[in-house]
Image: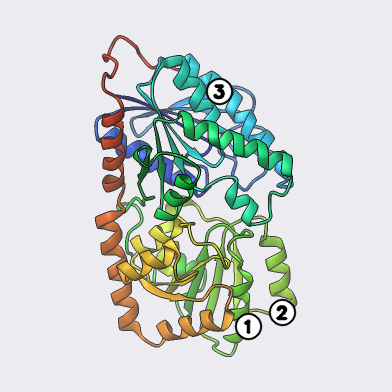
């Protein structure tokens, strides 16, 4: 079948969703589908398109057997809601036009956020008379409201109307957790339309490597107990908790904290670390994708942090940590999706969110027990390999697509081409 994947981010973009969407496309390709990806120029975290991309011409390429059309995008600066929406809409307009120039798909898949992509899915699906699958990575606008990032009543009302429209017209709504399923159910979406399909990790790429490796040596971590946070540095993570734990552990000279990533809260967090004299905390930029297995292997312990009250979010780095064979300390709500996963897999410790003392104690517990770290790392790896590999999750999408599409187009009558 012909599958159109309409996604804002795709590798080599460094956005958290990019490797997920790339793995989904490649997993569906492996199952025999013909996949066309329409995506924006890579731009996450730089305020502009990455080197090698730019201008106002659509670029076309074939990567790993998949056709990819990359579109120009307005990249706003400052992170305001208006800037984000303009960025989303610029991709909506150009991405929809690019998709329309291709031959019709049998089914369309698109993730949210951004929530505006649902409009493009609906328009394309209506014109082509095909089903679309709306993949909810974060329930929007709920997550932005909870974090205090969205307060304008008129904008909230508009996004609520958009949410109802997109849910109502979708042939299926996929969610990554039971908490998201409950949220979508509460908004009147029929249960038979909802499928819980978790996120996943490429377990061939993200794999256990030696603790002492070239990246570890390069960063001077071979003689340290490395505690790593790698991912988005934003409002919902509450990395002030990490700084609090680092302050309590300053007397343990072998413990080094690595904070790797970008995000709206990074500058303030770095300033606070400097003001507190936390020499045991180092901030690094996003690392090249090809180095990530070494980056994850360098950690003796990884951290997953979420603020109080957040229960339905499942940071994709959780799966990457487990795939790397390293244990983690999750400072999250005990009833959260993250806590449930960590405890089922035996992949680490769960401590109270926004509690620096509890986080520090969890780190010390694992520091003192090498065998426990090994067992937890192996348990996490085995769990994701069985349940959250690219192959396992792509097969669930494959089954969903085959249920929705009863009469796929005949190959050869329509040829996907690049305009």
- Left/right of residue 67 with respect to residue 249 in the rendered view: left
Could you say which is closer to the camera, residue 394 or residue 44?
A: 394
Give x and y (percent) for residue 244: 62, 79
Relative to 234, is 109 on the left or the right? left
Can residue 91 be seen here? The reply is yes
Contact (CB < 8 A) between labels 2 and 3?
no
* Secondary structure of residue under mark 1: helix
- For disc 1, the marked residue is 247
Looking at marks 2 and 3 on the same chain, the residue that comes earlier in the sequence is marked by 3
Q: In the rendered structure, which disc, 2 or 1, sits on the residue that comes first in sequence?
A: 1
| As drawn, 411 above or below 270 | above
Q: Which circle marks residue 348 in the picture?
A: none
For discs 3 and 1, the disc positioned in front in the rendered view = 1
Residue under the image location 32 percent in, 74 percent down: 376
Quadrant housing the N terminus: top left
Crowding at mark 1 (Cα within 10 Å: few <14, some 14-19, many 20+): many
Q: Which residue is mark 2?
A: 276
Q: Secondary structure under badge 3?
A: loop
Image coordinates of residue 102 in percent, x first then y, are 44, 16
Q: Residues within 10 Å of mark 3 (few under 14, many from 20)?
A: some
Circle 3/circle 1 CB separation < 8 Å: no
Q: Earlier in the sequence, mark 3 or mark 1?
A: 3
Image position of 56 with respect to 234: above or below: above
Q: Is residue 151 above or below residue 72?
A: below
Tag 2, which secondary structure? loop
Foreground of the two, 116 or 145 = 145
Marker disc for residue 58: 3
């Amino acid at each position: 079948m012909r599958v159109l994947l309409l996604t804002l981010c795709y590798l080599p973009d460094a956005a958290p969703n990019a490797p997920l969407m790339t793995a989904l496309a490649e997993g569906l390709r492996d199952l025999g589908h013909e996949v066309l990806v329409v995506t924006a120029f890579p731009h996450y975290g730089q305020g502009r398109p990455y080197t090698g991309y730019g201008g106002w011409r659509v670029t076309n390429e074939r990567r790993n057997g998949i056709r990819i059309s990359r579109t120009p995008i307005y990249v706003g600066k400052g992170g305001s809601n208006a800037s984000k929406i303009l960025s989303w809409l610029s991709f909506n307009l150009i991405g929809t036009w690019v998709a329309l120039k291709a031959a019709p798909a049998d089914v369309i898949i698109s993730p949210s956020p951004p929530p505006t992509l649902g409009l493009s899915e609906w328009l394309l699906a209506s014109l082509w008379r095909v089903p679309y699958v709306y993949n909810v990575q974060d329930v929007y606008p709920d997550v932005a409201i909870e974090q205090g990032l969205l307060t304008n009543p008129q904008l909230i009302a508009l996004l609520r109307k958009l949410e109802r429209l997109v849910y109502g017209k979708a042939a299926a709504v996929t969610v990554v957790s039971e908490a998201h399923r409950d949220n979508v159910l509460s908004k009147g979406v029929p249960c038979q339309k909802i499928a819980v399909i978790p996120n996943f990790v490429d377990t061939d790429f993200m794999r256990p490597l030696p603790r002492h490796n070239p990246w570890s040596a390069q960063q001077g971590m071979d003689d340290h107990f490395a505690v790593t946070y790698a991912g988005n540095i934003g409002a919902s993570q509450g990395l002030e908790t990490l700084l609090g734990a680092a302050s309590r552990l300053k007397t343990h000279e072998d413990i080094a904290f690595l904070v790797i990533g970008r995000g709206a809260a990074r500058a303030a967090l770095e300033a606070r670390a400097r003001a507190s004299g936390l020499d045991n905390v180092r901030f690094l930029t996003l690392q090249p994708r090809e180095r990530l297995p070494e980056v994850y292997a360098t950690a003796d312990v990884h951290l997953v942090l979420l603020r109080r009250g957040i229960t339905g979010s499942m940071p994709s780095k959780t799966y990457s940590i487990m795939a790397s064979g390293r244990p983690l300390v999750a400072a999250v709500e005990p009833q959260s999706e993250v806590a449930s996963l960590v405890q089922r897999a035996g992949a680490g410790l769960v401590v109270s969110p926004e509690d620096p003392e509890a986080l520090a104690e969890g780190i010390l517990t694992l520091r003192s027990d090498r065998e426990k770290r090994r067992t937890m790392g192996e348990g996490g790896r085995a769990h994701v390999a069985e349940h959250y590999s690219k192959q396992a999750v792509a097969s669930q999408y494959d089954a969903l697509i085959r249920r929705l599409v009863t009469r796929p187009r005949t190959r050869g009558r329509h040829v996907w081409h690049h305009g």
